[in-house]
Image (cartoon, helix red, strand yellow):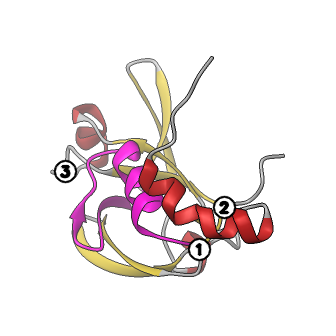
Amino acid sequence: MGFAIPSDTIIKEMPSLVANGSYNLHSYLGIGGVDMNYQLTQASGTNFTYGVLIENVVQGGPASNAGLRAGNRTETILGRLYFIGGDIIVSINGTRVINNDALATYLEENTIAGQTVSLGIIRDGNYVNVNVQLGARPPIS
């Protein structure tokens, strides 16, 4: 088995790895989300077929502290249960977020724990900007 770590990531983490033997500044939002799609768009009553639908928010985490909302009702779509009615993240610091992968990539490449980011969200059909101070990603347990 092999894997690759982008050079940009190594360059960002190297000083901490050399000095401390670890890197603890991976940013963390504290959400569980799913990629928007046509079926979720219809069930949610929105026009956005891209973005990340927030299904749950970690209590006391960065998203919770910023007031981001999780899904509040369930819907079965194509045989899968979703929590809908939550905020939909469509941008971060002005960069369009098309799915979870794009959000995670942006966070890893452009942010560190403690930084404040501006999330563009869809809430109740309206576009809103919410500032979130990112936390440090918790260790894997």
Residue 18 quadrant = bottom right
Does the magenta run of residues contain 105?
A: yes
- Check contact, mark 1 vs mark 2: CB within 8 A: yes
Marks 1 and 3 sit apart, C-alpha to C-alpha, by 29 Å
Q: For numbered disc 3, what is the local secondary structure?
A: loop
Q: Is residue 93 left or right of residue 24?
A: left
Q: Nearer the viewer, residue 102 or 19?
A: 19
Q: Residue at x 78, y 47 (%)?
A: 140
Give how far across and how far down residue 107 sits, in percent: 44, 61
Callout 3, which amino acid?
Phe
Which of discs 1 and 3 lies nearer the camera? The answer is 1
- Residue 130 visible within the image: yes
| Sequence order check, earlier mark of 2 and 3 | 3
Q: Residue at x 39, y 43 (%)?
A: 101
Which of discs 2 and 3 lies nearer the camera? The answer is 2
List the single residue furthest toward the right: 141
Give how far across and how far down residue 3 sits, in percent: 55, 28
Q: Nearer the viewer, residue 94 or 25?
A: 25
List the single residue furthest toward the front: 18
Give how far across and how far down residue 15 sits, in percent: 63, 69
Q: Residue at x 31, y 42 (%)?
A: 36
Q: Nearer the viewer, residue 1 or 78?
A: 1
Does the magenta run of residues contain 71?
A: no
Q: Which residue is mark 3?
A: 48
Give how far across and how far down residue 30 sits, in percent: 60, 62
Q: Which mark is residue 137?
A: 2
Highlighted magenta segment, given as a residue range: 86-112
Q: Which mark is residue 113?
A: 1
Classify 10 Å Cα crowding around label 2: few (below 14), some (14-19), many (20 and above): some
- Residue 71 visible within the image: no
